[in-house]
Image (tube, rainbow, N blue to C red):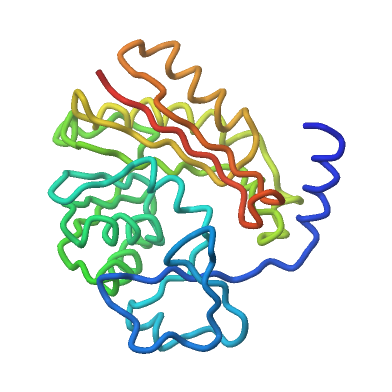
């Protein structure tokens, strides 16, 4: 990064984060709370300028999430009727966005490494207006389960990472950064890619802004898998986007 970019990023990371919510079209809001201000750059998203609208959140009309999360869903472009896997799903924000984007008509499987997180995941997704989502425990650092091989039209892979894109929001990150996750990311991508049908697509995403967890992981994967193609990628720098930092890449399987 250029020195001026680094300075701007460091300054951003030491400012107070804003809180955002996404409107759920499947459970319309009955009167938009006065505390919400619409975001011009992200239709359907709102900045919370006052009390958190708890009743609307409990009803499933609003979901607390950062607008940077929309890029991974936009790249995935989920369609009604598709068989879709959200491989690292808990607590369910991106699964909820997939449900909304497909009008509740995606055949969605949402998995997570930690089985104890599945009840909360299912509860969150039921609240979003789709009770047909399948939830399951899965460790994607291990080979793809045989019953899921070449099964899905689209896979969202929001991998564990260092969280360097969200230091403003998670101040503890700067004291616990570790390179250990990077090796896991490569194996998770390798194994989850086996769940994609020929002609299907996978979105690899992180809340990191470090190339070692982002573009370099993707390019290493592509070098070893010529049947895959990088269609598009997006790096969101938080001080530029005025949101959390993130990365997302759309990969297509031949």
Residue 93 position in % (x across, y down): 40, 60
Q: Could you tell me which quadrant the N terminus lies in?
A: top right
In the displayed structure image, the side of residue 4 where residue 170 appears, left or right: left
As displayed, is residue 98 above or below residue 149? below
Q: Could you tell me which quadrant the C terminus lies in?
A: top left
In the displayed structure image, the side of residue 214 where residue 17 appears, left or right: right
Q: Nearer the viewer, residue 170 or 2?
A: 2
As displayed, is residue 63 above or below residue 114? below
Residue at position x 45%, y 53% in the image: 70
Residue 253 position in % (x across, y down): 28, 22
Residue 251 position in % (x across, y down): 37, 27
Image quadrant where residue 237 sits:
top right
Image quadrant where residue 122 sits:
bottom left
Q: Nearer the viewer, residue 141 or 5?
A: 5
As displayed, is residue 35 above or below residue 82? below
Image quadrant where residue 216 sits:
top right
């Amino acid at each position: 990064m250029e020195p001026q970019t680094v300075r701007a990023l460091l300054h951003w990371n030491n400012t107070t984060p804003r809180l955002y919510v996404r409107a759920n079209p499947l459970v319309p809001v009955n009167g938009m709370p006065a505390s919400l201000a619409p975001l011009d750059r992200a239709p359907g998203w709102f900045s919370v300028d006052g009390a958190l609208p708890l009743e609307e959140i409990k009803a499933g009309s609003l979901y607390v999430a950062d607008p940077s999360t929309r890029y991974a869903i936009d790249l995935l472009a989920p369609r009604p009727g598709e068989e879709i896997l959200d491989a690292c799903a808990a607590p369910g924000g991106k699964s909820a966005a997939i449900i909304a984007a497909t009008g509740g008509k995606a055949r969605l499987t949402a998995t997570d490494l930690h089985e104890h997180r599945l009840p909360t995941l299912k509860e969150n997704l039921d609240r979003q207006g789709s009770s047909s989502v399948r939830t399951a425990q899965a460790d994607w650092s291990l080979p793809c389960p045989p019953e899921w091989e070449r099964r899905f039209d689209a896979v969202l892979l929001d991998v564990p990472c260092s969280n360097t894109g969200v230091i403003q929001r998670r101040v503890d990150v700067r004291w616990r950064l570790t390179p250990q996750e990077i090796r896991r990311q490569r194996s998770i991508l390798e194994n989850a890619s086996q769940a994609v049908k020929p002609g299907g697509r996978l979105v690899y995403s992180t809340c990191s802004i470090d190339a070692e967890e982002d573009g370099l992981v993707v390019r290493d994967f592509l070098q070893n898998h010529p049947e895959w193609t990088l269609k598009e990628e997006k790096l969101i720098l938080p001080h530029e986007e005025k949101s959390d930092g993130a990365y997302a890449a759309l990969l297509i399987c031949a």
